[in-house]
Amino acid sequence: MEVTTRLTWTDEIHLRNLLGNVSLSLLYKSSAHGDRIEDMVQRCSHQGCTVTMIYVNDNIIVAFMLGNYSNLCENSTELNDSLWFSVQKKNGTTEVETLLLNVAPKISDKQLVGRSLQKDIFLIRLYNNTIYLTEMIAKNLKLDFYGFQKYLECEVFRVEGFKDNLHYAKKIMKAGEHRNRLLAEIRAYKPYADLVSEIRILLVGPVGSGKSSFFNSVKSVFHGHVTCQAIVGSDVTSITEQFNPHKPITPEHSTFITSPSLKDRIHCVAYVLDINSIDNLSSKMLAKFKKVHKEVLSCGIAHVALLTNVSNCSEVLQDNFLNMSRSMTSQSQVTNVNKMLGIPISNILMVGNYASDLELNPVNDILILSALRQMLRAADDFLEDLPLEETGAIVRVLQPHV
């Protein structure tokens, strides 16, 4: 009979994303394979990196990462730092907290123990389904209990596709935390001085540059899974028509606004370019970009450049995720866009859109959210710089051509 995990599909997706799109294979389940520490070690030894799940109740999962189980005997001198997670359901949403413990779990007296300064800071007793956590661990994981607690089940998974080193673990952990901060910041965003209720961002770019993909990627991050609300076109046929040069908008058009108010204006223009095609832009397309940009500048509208299809997002970001690393592979394209349109380096953004991916990645999410935040900040600068007489009624109409 096949042994199945208590881990829900949604919770597994969250954990896999935190670890960098790994795969999980169930090795041990206490209710099916025995409640002795020897049973766990026998099934989990020599399996490489593993994740141990402790189901404290129906809504909370406590998990920690270990090295090879064969190295956990009490007299072993090999250190295996542990990475802890708590996955909790609150108000219909899933919240994940992480904690890196610089202590090596060991097997002692038929229990799994973590000691720091000769003091037990966690232990797991399989024989009576009990977990012990110090207040420090519980606080960092935002759990509502500490000390000894009964659990429902213990499971161990083999982790495949994970770069088994402490630096990578720390980076993934920080990426998840930074992503959550960015997401919360943008969710709480309000336009400058409440001059408008929402920001209007115009995406301008060649066919297949990634305009619809970026829209879908932003929606995916906010939804928590990959979505394709906007249909994506190819390099032959464009799906998105913001402006049709063969049928320009005229005053006779039913949706034409002669004197648009501030809420109807474009507040930020994002020039979208495939980072791999910048050097191959035709003179005709370059002329179109410069024509649009000249009109944007004359209207004083905020603008950024968005370079899509970045192949390795991890190389683009510094380890603190706060700034771009400007790796050599992308520096030349950034410089070209800077010279081509005169856009400041700080406003040339890079993303790896979710075009063919099945799952989200926290590092990709950071680039997508950072790009969106920079667009919002640019739009705020535009609103802040408006003359007082323009905050009530706008008399100039922008009609870009692509």
Image: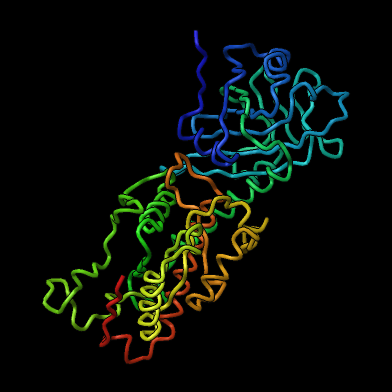
Left or right side of 246 for 116: right
Label count reads 0
* Residue at image location 11% in from the left, 77% down from the top: 252
Q: Quadrant of the C terminus?
A: bottom left
* Residue at image location 49% in from the left, 7% down from the top: 1
372 or 249, which lies in front? Answer: 249
Compared with 362, 5 (above or below) is above
Left or right side of 113 for 277: left
Compared with 132, 109 (above or below) is above
385 or 250, which lies in front? Answer: 250
Q: Classify residue 239 by image quadrant.
A: bottom left
Q: Classify residue 163 by image quadrant.
A: top right
Q: Residue 157, percent across and down? A: 61, 25
Compared with 148, 167 (above or below) is below
Q: Residue 127, percent across and down? A: 68, 15
215 or 234, which lies in front? Answer: 234
**Name of the residue lying farthest toward the top:** 1
